[in-house]
Amino acid sequence: GAGPLRVTPQALSSAAGPQAHLEMNLCWNEIKKKSHSLRARLEAFSDHSGKLQVPLQEIIDWLGQKDEELSAQLPLRGDVLLVQQEKETHAAFMEEVKSRGPYIYSVLESAQAFLSQHPFEELEEPTSESKDVSPRHRIQNISRFVWKQANVTSELWEKLTARCVDQHRHIERTLEQLLEIKGAMEELSTTLDQAESVRETWEPIGDLFIDSLPEHIQSTKLFKEELSPMKDGVKVVNDLAHQLAISDVHLSMENSRILEQINMRWKQLQASINERLKQLQDAHRDFGPGSQHFLSSSVQVPWERAISPNKVPYYINHQAQTTCWDHPKMTELYQTLADLNNIKFSAYRTAMKLRRVQKALRLDMVTLATALEIFNEHDLQPSDRGMDVAEIIHCLTALYERLEEERGILVNVPLCVDMSLNWLLNVFDSGRSGKMRVLSFKTGIACLCGTDIKEKFQYLFSQVANAGGLCDQRHLGILLHEAIQVPRQLGEVAAFGGSNVEPSIRSCFRFSNGKPAIEVSQFLEWANLEPQSMVWLAVLHRVTMAEQVKHQTKCSVCRQCPIKGFRYRSLKQFNVDICQTCFLTGRASKGNKLHYPIMEYYTPTTSSENMRDFATTLKNKFRSKQYFSKHPQRGYLPVQSILEADFSET
């Protein structure tokens, strides 16, 4: 129950001797000195750390405030003047931050010096049970706190300075883009003003002369071409505005309004130019030299020429209240072709029908050279390209105008163009789609033009041959398929092998010497044998040549003298000559049958030919029926052709 024992230096000295008393006093004095030194050190440490903690905290608060001010400067507004003001504001802000830098660096250096004098270790925090903190722990905690403050200050300072630099670059870049947008929009507005003033000078389409339409079309195309750089300018401005929007910079209301007006005016200008060009081209197509408007004169009352949506013409009979695809004159022509159906031999029947068509279309007066000029002028390449009705009419119009110019004759161009168009559509576009291939058009014209048969075959071959002048089986098949459409239109295709052109291809490629492609010379050698699929074209050539020929002899059947056209001489009976009408229709004399073989002439006979035929007839008098049965005539030809049985196609 006694109180604590108090020990004093006096008590200790009284309990010991004099020597011990002296030593005890020295020890006690040493302890007092150390205690005073430690107290002074703690007071100095606390005073120094306090001088660091306060400015560090002030700097941290200031840096946080400036970071908020910097964030408040965004987003930038999309106007040059406003961004220039932001640039000045930011420059002042950066100057303020820069002026604060030396002070911040000095405080951080002081903190670094303090921490170098008072390093700390990563010690465990004192437990909650311990009531007192030792002086050593206290010093460690203060050093640790100063270190944390210095780190936060350094990080915030680096972040703020980096953001200042980035924002400065952002402002500079934005200002540069806005200046570029402003300059581009001013330039575009000026160009649009000039273009719109030109547009105001345009005359209405209805007030223009038809002859001036090509000139106006050309000037409108040039005007459109001159404005093509504006398209790039508008795109650049819109791209710049988009880039600014990505950077969270949106154009001001005024700039947005100007840009929207530029886009709207540009679209309207483009639309008006395209519409103007379309109207001019439509007017030129409908009323110009290559239009269908002038073709309305190809028919007479009560007929009217009309056009379907795909530009294919059809014809209205207002009296009968009917419509048809065929031109009235074409209908009459087809009716006259029926008169030739009494011809027994299909090749001649087809050729003579084609001859009437050829004359009605006036194509017998067109040379292949003239046709090729027109084809080249209208760039009819490649052959598998499609042609519409407007392009066909344009080519046909140029063809007949050239014919009129070269021959110096009067040609009813509207009627010839309309009739030829009608014929070509019947042959190659019976479904009236309004389209045909360039090869079809060329084939139709080449077959009926007035040119030597060899030139026709050479030209037709060139249209399917490759650059090396060779033609494979596939392309030959395409050519033969196009050509066979001509007799098909006349209802005569069956006699020429029908739609199957494979036998013709095989017979032609027997001249290829086993190669996968044939040359033009090999094709001509085959065509010269008058193969079944193409014989009608060769016969057409002979029919044309025979028209003006007169033979000074009498027909043994109808007694016509002289014989006009083809002359048929019997090589079995002497002095038996028959005119083409009697022979081709199968008329006989006094009930006697015609005896083969028979020689056909489409040119006047010479004395040597007469002697040769006399000798042949004499030989045939002594030949048996079995001999002639081995050389039968072909159903589509009146006489035996050179084409032997080995090359027969059907």
Image (tube, grey):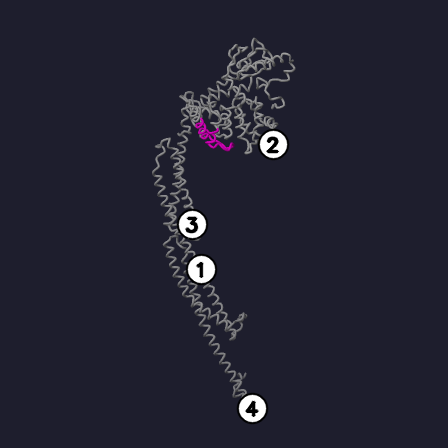
Could you tell which of marks 2 and 3 lies nearer the N-terminus?
A: 3
Q: Residues within 10 Å of mark 1 (few under 14, many from 20)?
A: some
Q: Disc 2 designates what residue?
A: 516
Q: Disc 3 designates what residue?
A: 240
Q: Position of residue 19 (x, y in %)?
A: 55, 90
- What's the residue type where badge 2 is placed? Pro
- What's the residue type where badge 4 is placed? Gly
Could you tell which of marks 2 and 4 lies nearer the N-terminus?
A: 4
Question: What segment carries the magenta color?
Answer: 372-399
Could you tell me which secondary element the residue under label 1 belongs to?
Answer: helix
Return the mark for residue 293: none
Q: Disc 4 designates what residue?
A: 17
- What's the residue type where badge 3 is placed? Leu
Asked if residue 502 is among those painted magenta in the image, a careful observer would answer no
Q: Out of 192 and 6, give the one closest to the viewer.
A: 192
Asked if residue 374 is among those painted magenta in the image, a careful observer would answer yes
Please name which of the two marks, 2 or 4, marks the residue nearer to the observer.
2
Please name which of the two marks, 2 or 1, marks the residue nearer to the observer.
2
Could you tell which of marks 3 and 1 lies nearer the N-terminus?
A: 1
Furthest residue in direction front, as rendered: 608
Q: How many marks?
A: 4
Q: Quadrant of the C terminus?
A: top right
Q: Disc 1 designates what residue?
A: 163
Q: Position of residue 277 (x, y in %)?
A: 40, 36
Could you tell which of marks 2 and 1 lies nearer the N-terminus?
A: 1
Q: Residues within 10 Å of mark 3 (few under 14, many from 20)?
A: some
- What's the residue type where badge 1 is placed? Arg
